[in-house]
Structures are given as structure tokens and as C-alpha cells.
Amino acid sequence: MPVPEATASKGTLPTGPADRRRMWQLVFGVLCMVMIANLQYGWTLFVTPIDQKYHWGRAAIQVAFTLFVLTETWLVPLEGYLIDRFGPRLVTLFGGALVGASWTMNAFAASLAALYTAAAIGGVGAGIVYGAAVGNSLKWFPDRRGLAAGLTAAGFGAGSALTIVPIARVIESRGYETAFLWFGIVQGLGVMAVSLALRAPGPGDVPQVRPSMRVLQGVRDFTPMETLRSPIFWLMYVMFVAVATGGLMATAQLAPIANDFRVAKVPVSLLGITLPALTFALSIDRVLNGVTRPFFGWVSDQIGREVTMFVAFMLEGFGILLLLRYGADPLMFVILSGMVFFAWGEIYSLFPATCGDVFGRRFATTNYGMLYTAKGTAALLVPLSSLLSDARGWTAVFLAASILNFVAAFLAIGVLKPMRTRVLRRAIVADAPAAAGVD
């Protein structure tokens, strides 16, 4: 079967009959991501009720969140290898079972040890699903990596938007245990059902990509060991940790921050809707955190990954500072927390797209899985943010997070861009057939 050719610089998804298989695989990946979103983005709703019942302390409870993120991220390279080796279907099916088991265990956890065990199990399950979905998007859409990875990641970022209010109401009316049980079962079964439709692309399923000097892509596939030896990989790893730290802190600590600012239960009217500030913020944040991923992914397909990173990371840094300054106002708390999440969520489209561009398609799931462990490294700082806020207040936490974003922004434009340009330009020029088609 002849393979169609595509350029790397266009940003819209193809819609011809030959692309229907690709589109359906993208849809299935997004659905899987929606089903695991609450494991991370719904967690903040449970912290205070758990503490009110058992009085373990916020810092001790947030260790469960850290364990979830660590197991979700640091095992993805191994899970990615299994997915690259055996395909996404059966591995994701197993991941869905772990997702359902995790929140079911949370419903009955009466000790920190039980809570931590459930978090670790959920992290393994979510990591499998996340790695399979993102890896599949990178493989099926080498010509639209930014947009495809962004749409897939949007399922994770915005997937909990529709369930924030229902979860909050179930917690209030029936207790957090019931919320864990009901939503855990639905989410686990949902992943298992959709996973049966996933598959990796075969010969002739994806277009060949013509190299572009605007959105640089490598001309060969790097093995995982070659990827680990690349300075570009470790530079992106440092940047990923820097930006992820502030976003994870906001994700895990938004409810405690709202309570400390005394705005959590204050009614806010916006867009014709009136809700308590925290509930409103969580709902809007989930939507914006989802929208930003395909948006910035599409932008990066047009103007390049590093320029897009610079703009987004600077916006995130200023958003954190503004939230610190004006967050005590309920309306501004809602608006500015949305700005923070909008400027943060794009890392989950920009970094996988860049990783695929540099290191190729064949081992895309494993290679991005190794880079994705940076999120786990950043998660180690989340409990420290609780301790730092108790000792120094939220000012120190917010300032540290904003500085990390500013540093990452300048690394993107000042170090990563020239480094990638030099390396990939040499690779493109060395490959004569590809060089003939450079834009």
C-alpha cells in the first residue's frame, strides 16, 4: 500500500476517508484519558474530608497524591516498553482494572498505609492508560504531533470537568467514601471497555513526514538507550520538572489554598452561573487545562515547539504571581486559577510532541515514558509545599513556582531551540532524500 506524504508544519487534523482509522484511534485514546482524569484532578476534593474524619494532617494525606504521581510516572518507561512490544489493547485493559481497584480501596481505607497502597495501585493503572493513549497519538499522527498529543492530553486535563460538581455533591450528601466507590467503578469499567478498540498503526496506516526547518523532526528512530544518552533529553527533563512543579502544587493544593484565602465557599457569579468559588474554580480550571493542550499543541505545529514553550511558561509564571497577589478576592481567585491551569497544561502536549520529533516514532511510547517521569520528580515537591506554606506561608511557595517557570521559559528559547536546530539540521542535511524536500 503506498504511504501518503505529509508535511510536519501543518496544524489541522486530516479528514479524508483514508484517515478514519487514525481519527478513531485518537477518539479512543481521548476517552481513556477522560476516564482516569479524576484520579489526579479530583483528588483535591477528598483531602479535607479525609482529614476531618481521621485527623492525619494535610501533609500526611498529600503523601498519597505524591505516591500516585510517582507510580503514575516512574513506571511508564517499563509500561511503555510493554505497550511498544505487545500493543496497547491488553496492557490498557489491565490498567483499567487497576484504576477501578484503586478508588474502591480508597473508599474503605482506614489507615494511611491503606490510603498509600491504593494511591500506588491507581498510579500504576493511570500510568499505563496515559502512556498508551499518548504513545498511540504520537505514532498515528507524526504529521500533527502537537495537535494530536494535545487533544489526547486534553482528555486528561479536562476529563474531570463534568464530574467535579457531581463528586462534590456526593461527598457532601453521602460522604467521600461513597464518591470514591461509585466513581471508581465507573471509571475502571469505562477504561476496560474502550481499551478493547485500541491498536498500534501498521504498515501504510500513517503518512510519511517531509522534514521542515520550522518544526524540526529527526530522520531516524532512537532506541531508549540512545535517548538517555542525548543531552537534549536531559535538558527537556529539567524543564519538565521546573514547569510541572508549580502545576502539581496548584492541582493538589487548590482547595487548601482557597480555604486559607477564605474564599472557598464564597459564591461567585460568572458567565451567568453562580457557584462557590472553589467549585467554580475547579470546574473552569479543568476546562481550561484541557483546552490549552490542543491549543498550544496546534500553535507549536505552526511556529515551533520552543517558541510556544517560551510564551506559555512565561504566562504561567506571571499567572502564579497574580494569583498570589489577588487570590483573596473570590472572583479573581476563579479567574486567575484558570489562567494558571491554562498556562500549565500545555506541557502535556509540547513535551511529548517534541520528544517524538527528536527521537522518532518506533519507540515513542517508551521514550516519552522516560521523559514523563519528570512529573514524578516534580511530585516529590508537593508535600514540601504543604510544609513550606505552614512555615512561611503561601508567598514562598508561589514565588518559587513562578521562578521555576521563568527559568524554563528562557531555557526553551535560549538553549533547547539552538541545540535542537544544530542537531536536527545536521541529521536532515546528512540524509540526502529528506534534504531535497526541506521547506
Image: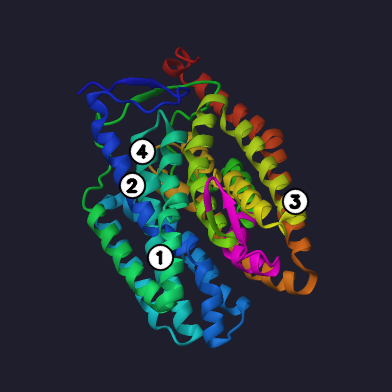
Residue 266 is covered by the magenta coloring: yes
Residue depicted at x 51% and y 64%? 69
Q: To which residue does mark 4 refer?
A: 139
> Hey, what amino acid is under mark 2?
Gly
Q: Secondary structure at mark 4?
A: helix
Q: Amino acid at mark 4?
A: Lys
**Looking at the picture, which amino acid does disc 1 mark?**
Val
- Marks 1/2: CA distance? 17 Å
Q: Which tag, 4 or 1, sits closer to the chain's start? A: 1
Residue 381, visible in the rendered structure = no
Q: Which of the two residues, 173 or 371, is positioned nearer the viewer here?
A: 173
Asked if the stretch drawn in magenta spans residue 227, the answer is no
Mark 2 and 4 residues: CB-CB less than 8 Å, in contact?
A: no
First-in-chain label (2 vs 4):
2
Mark 2: few/some/many CA within 10 Å (<14, 14-19, 20+): many
Q: Residue beneath label 1, please?
A: 124
Q: Answer few, some or many: residues within 10 Å of disc 1's Cα (few below 14, many 20 plus, some between 14 and 19).
A: many
Q: Nearer the viewer, mark 3 or mark 2?
A: 3
Q: CB atoms at circles 3 and 2 under 8 Å apart?
A: no
Q: Which residue is mark 2?
A: 29
User: Between disc 1 and disc 2, whose residue precedes?
Assistant: 2
Q: Earlier in the sequence, mark 3 or mark 4?
A: 4
| Marks 3 and 2, the one that precedes in the sequence | 2
Mark 3–mark 4 distance (CA, rounded to whole Å)? 38 Å
Residue at the far top: name it. Answer: 436
Instruction: Give the structural element (helix, strand or loop) at label 3.
Output: helix
Q: Secondary structure at mark 2?
A: helix
Mark 1 vs mark 2, foreground winner is: 2
Q: Which one is earlier in the sequence, the residue at label 3 or at label 1?
A: 1
75 in relation to 133, above or below: below
| Residue at the disc numbered 3 | 321
Where residue 271 appears, as percent x and y from the top left, is 54, 45
